[in-house]
Amino acid sequence: MEGTRREDIRPGLTVMVELEEHKRSGKLTGGRVKEVLTTAPIHPHGIKVKLDSGLVGRVKEII
């Protein structure tokens, strides 16, 4: 499942995110959502979240 709709993302979900520093390479990092940062209902590049590890990135896949 893609991570472009805010209603699909909630704290506790395991997701794959693309971190800001990996934008060009497309490398994904896995983690559990701690907080949803995007306020818009839909974002074409993925909903921005903060992971339990403290990393911030855009959701590319929901596991």
Image (cartoon, rainbow, N blue to C red):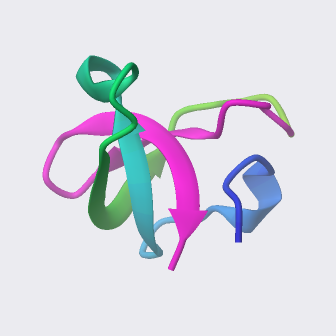
| Residue 25 inside the magenta-drawn segment | no
Locate residue 58, reporting x and y percent: 50, 38
Location of residue 46 (image quadrant): top right
Seen from the viewer's position, the closer of residues 52 and 60 is 60
Work out which residue is located at the far front of the displayed protein and give it: 25
Seen from the viewer's position, the closer of residues 23 and 5 is 23
Instruction: State the residue at coordinates (67%, 30%).
Output: 45
Locate residue 47, reporting x and y percent: 63, 40
Locate residue 59, reporting x and y percent: 53, 49
Instruction: State the residue at coordinates (32%, 68%).
Output: 32
The span picked out in magenta is 42-63
Q: Is residue 18 left or right of residue 46?
A: left
| Residue 55 inside the magenta-drawn segment | yes
The number of numbered discs placed on residues in the rendered structure image is: 0
Q: Is residue 58 left or right of residue 23?
A: right
In this view, 49 is above or below 19? below
In this view, 40 is above or below 13? above
In this view, 4 is above or below 45? below
Instruction: State the residue at coordinates (70%, 72%).
Output: 1
Q: Is residue 24 left or right of residue 10?
A: left
Locate residue 56, reporting x and y percent: 32, 34
Work out which residue is located at the far right of the displayed protein and give it: 41
Q: Is residue 63 left or right of residue 32?
A: right
Work out which residue is located at the far left of the displayed protein and give it: 53
